[in-house]
Image (cartoon, rainbow, N blue to C red):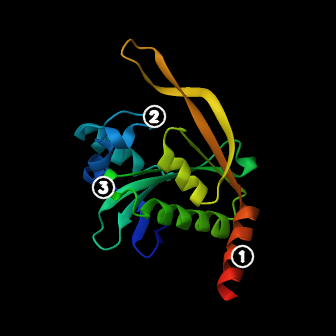
Amino acid sequence: MGVLETQRLTMRGFKPEDWEDLHDYLSREEVVRYEPYGVFDEEASKAEALRRSTDHAFWAVCLKESGKMIGNLYFQQQEPQAFQTWELGYVFGSGFQGQGYATEACLRLLEYAFSDLQIRRVTAHCDPRNHPSWQLLERLQLRREGHLLQTGYFKNDIEGHPLYHDTYAYGLLGSEWLSIQQAASDKQQA
């Protein structure tokens, strides 16, 4: 895993000392509401930062100016590897949402994935109730490929019964990404 940069952001691997910034956002219910885990306490944040420091699927997203980690990206090759499909995910602190940081970070990661790694396909999934998440995916030019009913559950109700949720499935091919980038470049030159 290398380092990716944008105008405002640096994306890099996790470090164990990232636990405090990780805790800043994973300890908030409004941030983890649609995630497959609950609110983190300090010990869980320390353990998770340590785990992610050896897991190359997680990218820490940091402000270039201060170095503060404001969120993270998840980018993992799916099985079977012969399909050359990678899954994209993201979580950003509530104080850093709605400012274009997620769009900026994801666009840079997609550029790296399709141009440098030359992967074939990216997928993403989100809860339909999480409007900002699916709106982000559509801004990134991923195509909604399906609305999957009660695909799974992450959490239980007060009586211990599963809370099933629907999922929107999104995808984008490398060939589509390259066409989109070429069209944008042609438009700028015109």
Q: Which mark is residue 56?
A: none
From this viewpoint, is residue 67 visible?
Answer: yes
Amino acid type at circle 2 is Pro
Pick the residue in front: 85 or 51.
Answer: 85
Residue 47 x %, y %? 32, 41
Tell me which numbered mark, 2 or 3, is placed earlier along the sequence: 2
- Disc 1 element: helix
Tell me which numbered mark, 1 or 3, is placed earlier along the sequence: 3
Dots 1 and 2: beta carbons under 8 Å?
no
Q: What residue sits 71% from the left and 52% below the top?
A: 84
Residue 89 x %, y %? 52, 49
Quarter-of-image position of residue 78: top right
Q: Is 176 located above or below residue 45 in the figure?
A: below
Q: Which residue is mark 2?
A: 36
Q: Nearer the viewer, mark 1 or mark 2?
A: 1
Amino acid type at circle 3 is Gly
Q: CA distance from mark 1 to mark 2?
A: 37 Å
Left or right: residue 124 versus residue 92 is right
Residue 153 x %, y %? 51, 26
- Disc 2 element: loop
Q: Nearer the viewer, mark 2 or mark 3?
A: 3
Pick the residue in front: 22 or 98.
Answer: 98
Amino acid type at circle 1 is Gln
Q: Which mark is residue 95?
A: 3
Q: CA distance from mark 2 to mark 3?
A: 21 Å
Q: What residue sits 68% from the left and 88% below the top?
A: 189
Q: Which mark is residue 182?
A: 1
